[in-house]
Image (cartoon, rainbow, N blue to C red):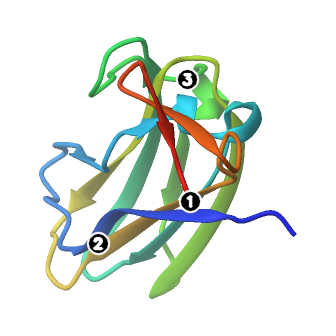
Amino acid sequence: MATRTTLAARTTAILTGSGTADYAADLDMNLTLDNEVTVEITATKGSLTNIITGFHAGAAATPTGTIGTGAAILTETLTDATWTRVVTLRVHERYFRVSVTGTGTNTSSDAVINYYYQPATPATQVVNGVAKVTA
């Protein structure tokens, strides 16, 4: 059975609410099998009006390039107190990360982001351009 790796990319934290993006941790796509990642976003509305989620990829760490345009960015007017969205993406850049932006008042709001992926190989992974043997 294949092993799935979980990266807690953003732990529970209040969103800024000011329209400034809060970024999750980078994921080096060289670590993933077939450049595929599943992103799970769980958010609590609090007093926010909207949560805007962006998917970013690029050749350098901390990418700011947005994957796709228009429909590729999930914008949602929150009506539920909490919600979870799960999206699976195939990313053809070296680095990937997610941004979450809240609009409105951020009181009692938060968002958690997890990345799930299958390791590139069971024995060797590439980390910062260097092959790393794993147990």
Determine whether the residue tagged by mark 3 lies in a helix, strand or loop. loop
For disc 1, the neighbor class at 10 Å (few under 14, some 14 to 19, many from 20) is few
Instruction: Compare residues 93 and 122 and report the one nearer the observer.
Output: 122
Q: Is residue 37 above or below residue 131?
A: below
Which of discs 1 and 2 lies nearer the camera? The answer is 1
Alpha-carbon span between mark 1 and mark 2:
27 Å
Of callouts 1 and 2, which one flags the residue occurring earlier in the amino acid sequence? Answer: 2
Indicate the amino acid at tag 1. Ala
The residue shown at (72%, 39%) is 33
Residue under label 2, please give it. 11
Alpha-carbon span between mark 2 and mark 3:
23 Å
Residue under label 3, please give it. 67
Of callouts 2 and 3, which one flags the residue occurring earlier in the amino acid sequence? Answer: 2
Instruction: Point out residue 28 in the picture as x, y percentages from the top left corner.
Output: 45, 34
The residue shown at (29%, 72%) is 11
The residue shown at (63%, 40%) is 32
Instruction: Compare residues 121 and 91 and report the one nearer the observer.
Output: 121
